[in-house]
Amino acid sequence: MSVEAREARQPWILLSPALTAVFLLLFVPLLFIVVYSFWLRTATGSDQVGFFLDNWREALTDAFYRDILFFTLKIAAITTLVCALMGYPAAYVIARSKGNKVLLLLLLMLPFWISYIIRTMSWINILGVSGALNTAMMWLGVIDAPIQMLYNQTTVILGLVHFLLPFMILNVFVSLEGIDTTLEDAANSLGATRWQAFLQVTLPLSLPGLAAGGLLCFVLGAGTYITPLVLGGPGDAMFANLVFEAIITQLNWPLGSALSLMLLAVLGVLVMIYNRYLGMAQLMKGLG
Amino acid sequence: MGGTMGWHLLRGWTVLVYLFMFLPVAVVVLLSFNASQFGSFPMTGFSFRWFVELAHNDAILRAFQTSFVLGLMTAVISTTLGVLASLALVRYRVPGSNYISTLLIAPILVPEVVLAVALLLFLNFLGINKSFTLLLFGHVIFTLPFVILVVQARLVSIKRDVEEAAMSLGASPRQTFFQITLPLMMPAVLAGALFAFTISFDDITGTLFWKPGGVETVPTQIFAMLRNSISPEINALGTVMILLTVGLPLLGMGIARSLSQKRGG
């Protein structure tokens, strides 16, 4: 074999183990559950191979699934909004601070290394019946008996915000860091107030980072089932909880396949919309 | 004046946001040293008793063992696959490399629940039931994109000049790889492996789908213990995990830094 041919083949030899793994452990399994979703779980507990639309009919028309899908999207949307409102100013301060920027960034990385389950359960120590807040309020005499603040929709959102906020801050920070600060100075010298300069110069330029952070918060938030199990009540099940129930508890794998694919489709559409939006933003940048 | 006022407000807000991120975790650490019977306030005294109990809890020790072995094996396999793929993407002109990169990070573009279901059902169809093997396959495919992202970012900064110099001085490609390229790549390899280990060690979303009954990793063990009530042992276990997952990367960064300093100096 010629040297050129060997050189051309080499990257494919290097890539093949990883590509094989992704194909065999992701793409083929995804195709497999598409097929599986048309099978039927029989009363005896075995799967009947064939082409049945029953699972899809149930997943797409049953009001129970539809309501939980909307509930899931609502929780994810509120979480994303709260993350943006809390995270944007913080990202701005980190990007513009001089002395302790490295420290602030290092601290921002820490939550990524602390286990999700520990961060989620840590709120039980704060809001539980004998948690920090109840203990403090009783000591201060604000309340006589502890109140149950946990296991509702608000604590699910709280847990998700706590988990996803670092993703938002990091993404906004990265885009703010890429903006030339002299642009704001220029706007100021042309007579804009600081607030105007921010609204008309910095904020629009940081939108790609905000969108990326928002997408991450939304998709990760909408795909969780652990947070509702730990911090939610019985009525706070999200869509991924339905998938978990169908697969692990009811062992109805064909239905679980259909529900998984539904979740994938809804969140996939969002990623595609985002792609399109960012493409447009890119286009505008090119024009400007 | 208005400007500095606004800046102070923003800084105050940022302090609150950081407190929000860290205070609950700090409370976990604080309560793990609580001498009280219950895993809650008030603090009745300072004690290591919950850590001692941890060390005598067989279920927890088994969970640690499972998590360690799983994390190590995941790190080795994932890093090997990831480093090879990254080398191809950074060092060669591969036609369609953009598409290949997207394909390789696809496992984190798909919601983890969906990945978990697909892998469980497909491997079960092939005759691989819920088992350690299934867990390992799952953790490898889930950590691979992170390894590739980290390693690729670091490989870019290694210059090819050094390798070319070695070759021109008569080193064979094999010698060049093992004596020049690999040592230069070590920080990237180490970073990738640590990343894979930490992600595997922390994972619960996929793990709950893949683990066989009776086998627990540390996160699923914590999850199972939460079902009963929050005991001081959970807080102690949480503290140990924080020490591990925060301490290991810091240690790794230190090693990577000293390696690169030795080379530079």
Image: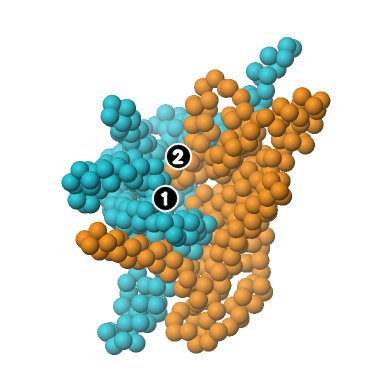
What's the residue at 73%, 11% (across, down)?
A: A2
Residue B4 appears left or right of A253: left
Residue B34 in the image: state x and y as whole percent.
52, 81
Q: Which residue is mark 2?
A: B110
What's the residue at 46%, 46% (across, down)?
A: B113
- Which is more toward the observer, B148 or B179? B179
* Residue A286 figure quarter: top left
Residue A135 in the image: state x and y as whole percent.
37, 82
Which chain corresponds to the colour cyan? A
Q: Which residue appears farthest toward the front when viewing the image? A: A189
What's the residue at 60%, 56% (across, down)?
A: B249
Front: mark 1 or 2: 1
- Which is more toward the observer, A50 or A113? A113
Q: Secondary structure at mark 1?
A: helix
Q: Amino acid at mark 2?
A: Val
Asked whether the viewer can see residue A254, the reply is no
**Where the C terminus of chain A falls, by quadrant?**
top left
Rendered hue of chain B is orange
Discs 1 and 2 carry the same chain letter:
no
Chain holding disc 1 = A
Note whether A55 is above or below A237 in the view shown. above
Residue B248 in the image: state x and y as whole percent.
62, 58
Q: Are marks 1 and 2 in contact (CB under 8 Å)?
A: no
- Which is more toward the observer, B104 or B248? B248
Q: Which residue is mark 1?
A: A170
Density class for disc 2 (Cα within 10 Å; few <14, some 14-19, many ≥20) is many
Q: Amino acid at mark 1?
A: Leu
In space, the residues marked 1 and 2 are separated at their CA atoms by 21 Å
What's the residue at 22%, 62% (across, down)?
A: B1
Chain holding disc 2 = B
Asked whether the viewer can see residue B19, the reply is yes
Residue A261 appears left or right of A8: left
